């Protein structure tokens, strides 16, 4: 999930940066909040998260009302695993712009990683509600996937299955969604459907050794 999360956040940043007036790339030093914001995005894309955070911090210093700078810095802290700082920045971003679905998605994911499942589900539900109005509507499946994971961790398997099913409808080629729905079915005792999902995951990625082992284990459980 971490790899998927990082890719999603990269798309979040790309969408929002498009709305920022262009800075002069390659200039000696950025001078405006937007300059620092865009250079920070460049560092983020390169995986240099510490420098990205430093630039987003400068953008905030120059423009304390930049919800995007708080969003980007919060995302960066989440990538580093510093969920409390990430959540604090995302709280501020939401205060400045309460209608950005990506901010709720990121904060919900941070809450999920902190095992605060109720808050995670609330934020991811808000992200799903707002996403049709968002410029990144193609990312709706990520919110369903993450909320499904939160429901799964809370052992609410029926709701988890419903969310994974919706995520599969939106993105039928994501291995992780089939795997997680397979686990939900397995925990419910529906072995046949669990096997079907693990088989579907392997059709997409036949080289996933972990899924193949799980499939073999579940098949053995059915044979008992």
Image: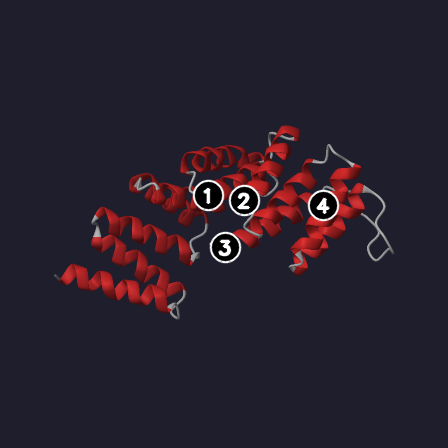
- Which residue matches tag 3? 2
Secondary element at tag 4: helix
Secondary element at tag 2: helix
The label shown at residue 26 is: none
Are there few (<14), some (14-19), or many (20+) residues within 10 Å of tag 2?
many
Tell me: residue 11, above or below residue 116.
below
- Which residue matches tag 4? 56
2 or 3: tag closer to the N-terminus: 3
4 or 3: tag closer to the N-terminus: 3
Foreground tag (2 vs 3): 2
Q: Position of residue 81 (x, y in %)?
A: 54, 50
Tell me: residue 213, above or below residue 76.
below
Secondary element at tag 1: loop
Distance between mark 1 and mark 4 Cα atoms: 24 Å
- Which residue matches tag 2? 83
Asked whether the residues under the numbered discs 4 and 3 touch, taking CB atoms below 8 Å apart as contact, a structural biologist would say no
The label shown at residue 114 is: 1
Residue at left offset 62%, top offset 49%: 76
Residue at left offset 40%, top offset 42%: 150
Foreground tag (4 vs 2): 2
Image quadrant in which the C terminus is located: bottom left
Q: Position of residue 25 (x, y in %)?
A: 82, 55
Residue at left offset 49%, top offset 43%: 109
Q: Work out whether residue 38 or residue 200 is closer to the camera in this orientation and state it.
A: 38
Asked whether the residues under the numbered discs 1 and 2 touch, taking CB atoms below 8 Å apart as contact, a structural biologist would say yes
Judge left or right: residue 122 versus residue 211. Answer: right
């Amino acid at each position: 999930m971490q790899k998927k999360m990082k890719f999603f956040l990269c798309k979040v940043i790309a969408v929002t940066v498009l709305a920022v007036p262009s800075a002069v790339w390659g200039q000696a030093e950025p001078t405006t909040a937007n300059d620092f914001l865009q250079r920070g995005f460049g560092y983020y894309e390169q995986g240099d998260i510490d420098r990205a955070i430093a630039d987003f911090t400068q953008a905030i210093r120059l423009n304390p009302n930049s919800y995007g700078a708080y969003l980007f810095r919060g995302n960066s802290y989440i990538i580093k695993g510093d969920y409390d700082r990430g959540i604090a920045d995302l709280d501020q971003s939401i205060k400045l712009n309460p209608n950005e679905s990506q901010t709720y998605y990121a904060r919900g994911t941070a809450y999920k990683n902190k095992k605060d499942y109720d808050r995670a589900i609330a934020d991811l539900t808000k992200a799903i509600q707002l996403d049709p109005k968002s410029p990144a509507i193609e990312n709706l499946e990520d919110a369903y996937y993450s909320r499904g994971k939160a429901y799964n961790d809370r052992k609410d398997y029926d709701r988890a299955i419903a969310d994974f099913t919706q995520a599969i409808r939106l993105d039928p080629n994501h291995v992780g969604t089939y795997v997680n729905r397979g686990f939900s079915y397995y925990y419910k005792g529906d072995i046949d459907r669990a096997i079907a999902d693990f088989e579907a995951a392997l059709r997409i990625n036949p080289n996933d050794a972990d899924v193949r082992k799980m499939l073999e284990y579940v098949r053995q459980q059915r044979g008992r």
